[in-house]
Amino acid sequence: MGCFASSKVTDEAGVAKINDTTLSDDFHERYLLGIKLGLGAFAQVRVAAEVNNAAKIEKAVKIIDLRDKGEDPVSGQATIRNSLNKGLEKTARKEVACWGRLGSHPNCVCMEAAFFCHSLCYVVMEKCNSGLLQALESMPELTERGLGNIFAQMLLGICHCHGARVVHRDIKPDNFIVGGKEGQTIKLGDYGLSAMLVKREKTSGTFGTAPFMSPEMLKGLTYDVKTDVWSFAVVVYVLLFGNFPYMPKVQNTKAMKRAIIDGTPDITPSFVPSQRAVGPTGVMYSNTALTFVKSLLDREPDARPSAMDALAMPWMVAALQGCHMTGAELPSLRQMLHAAKRVGAFEVRNKLTESPLDKYLNELQESRHGRPLPAAGKKKADSGSTTPPSPDKGKSFESDSSSGTTKSMNKSSDTDSVFSGWSKGTSSAQSQSS
Ligand SMILES: Nc1ncnc2c1ncn2[C@@H]1O[C@H](COP(=O)(O)OP(=O)(O)OP(=O)(O)O)[C@@H](O)[C@H]1O
Ligand SMILES: [Mg+2]
C-alpha cells in the first residue's frame, strides 16, 4: 500500500501550506506510538515520539481510520476491510489542508506533518496537556475574571482561523485544549469539519454538534465565519449560565435543532443562571459580560459581531489586560460548570475501551518495533510514555494517568451525571468554497 507524507512549509505571507510530497514514508517507521490522549467521534489521539530524534520530544498524533467498513453478508456483523474508503480520505485531506493554512499561532494547535498510509491518516501536532474541562476544574477560582481570559484566548484562535479564511464549524468546549510552554494556553484544535472560504464566498451544509450549531446553518442557508461566532457564544453562554441558550423540553438532538431554528419568544435565552446562586454582592454577572454574550448571540449573522469585533468588546479587552473588575469580589461560577456538564456541554468517551483501530495500530507498531502499544488502564511501570521499555519490564508500558485509573481527559472528575447524547452533523456540503 502506498504511503506518503505531507510536511508543512510556510509561504512568504507566513501562511503554512501542506506540501504533498509523495515520499514513500511510513508513519510507523518514523514514530513510536504511546498512550491514548483522547478520543473523538472520528479519531483517536495518541502520544508519538520520533524514533530518530535524540531529544525525544513528545508529539500528539491524531489517527483517523480511513478503512472501509461494511457488514458481513452472512452474519450481518460489522466488518472492517483494510482497503481505503475514498470518501473518508477526501474528508481527512480537507482537514489537513484547512489545518495547514493556519501555520503557527499560540491559540491554535499546531499541525506539523500528515501521513496517509495503511488506510489511516496520521496528523502529527504539538502535544497539549489537558482538555478544557480538566483545566476549568483545576482552576482554584472559577469566576468571570478567569473565564473572561479563557474566552479571549478562544477568540484569538478563532480570529486566526477566520483571518486564514477557514471556518471551523465545530466550535465547542471539547475542541479547545490546553497546552503551550506554561501549559496554560487555550488552543483551538480539531479541524475535521472545517472549510476553506474563497474570498467573501459562503459555504453550506450542516456540521458540528447540535447545541452549538447556528440558526443560519440549521435553516439550510449559506453561511460564513459568523457561524463560528454563534457557536463560540453558545460556549460562553453554557459556561456562564449552566444551560444552553435554546433548551428544548425534550433533551434530544432533533428537538435541540428545532429549538435553535424556531427561536420563538417562549424559548429565547433567559440570560439567568440555571442554578440558584448569588454572588457576594448580590450580582451574578457584570454588565460587560452580559452585553458581550447578548450581542454575540444575535440570530442575524450580519448583525452579529465578527470574532475580531468581539475581541474589541470591553470584557475581552479587560480580560486580556488582566484588569477585569479588580478588587471586586466575584461570585464563583463553579456550579454553572457542573450544570454545563449535566446538559452535555462536554462529551464523555471511554478511551480505555479497546477498539478495532487500537488492535490495528498495535499490529502495525509491533511489526515495526517489536513492541505493542501501551496497555490501556494498566498501572504505569515508568513515566516516559514513548521511551523504550527496559527488558525486564516486559512489553506493556504506561497507562494514561499517574494513578493508573480510568479518568479520561474529558471525563468529569466528580459524580455529576452527564448527558452526552448530542449527535454530530456531518452532511456533505454543497460547498461554494474550496
Ligand atoms: N494536540 C493534542 N494534545 C493532547 N490531546 C489532544 C490533542 N488533540 C486532541 N486531543 C484530545 O483528543 C480528543 C479528540 O481529538 P479531536 O477533537 O481532534 O478528534 P475528533 O474525532 O475529530 O473529535 P470530535 O468528536 O470533536 O469530532 C480531543 O477532544 C482531546 O481530548
Ligand atoms: Mg473534537
Image: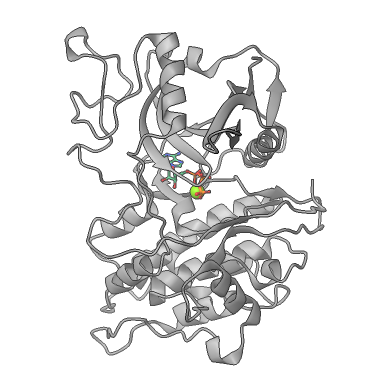
| x then y, percent, for residue 280 | 23, 84
Image height of 385 relative to 178, above or below: above
Q: Quadrant of the C terminus?
A: top right
Work out whether residue 353 can be spotted: yes
Place residue 254 in its image quadrant.
bottom right
Q: Quadrant of the N terminus?
A: top right
Q: Residue at x 58, y 26 (%)?
A: 81
Image height of 370 relative to 158, above or below: above
The foreground one among 4 and 318 is 4
Image height of 314 relative to 225, above or below: below
Left or right of 221 in this view: 279: left
Place residue 324 in its image quadrant.
bottom left
Q: Residue at x 46, y 17 (%)?
A: 364
Work out whether residue 180 can be spotted: no
| x then y, percent, for residue 310 | 58, 69
Image height of 124 relative to 193, above or below: above
Left or right of 84 in this view: 132: left
Name, please, the residue furthest toward the front: 74
| x then y, percent, for residue 33 | 40, 23
Q: Residue at x 65, y 37 (%)?
A: 88
The foreground one among 63 and 5 is 63
Q: Residue at x 72, y 58 (%)?
A: 205
The foreground one among 317 and 50 is 50
| x then y, percent, for residue 208 | 59, 57
The foreground one among 261 and 142 is 261
Say how the picture is coloured.
one colour
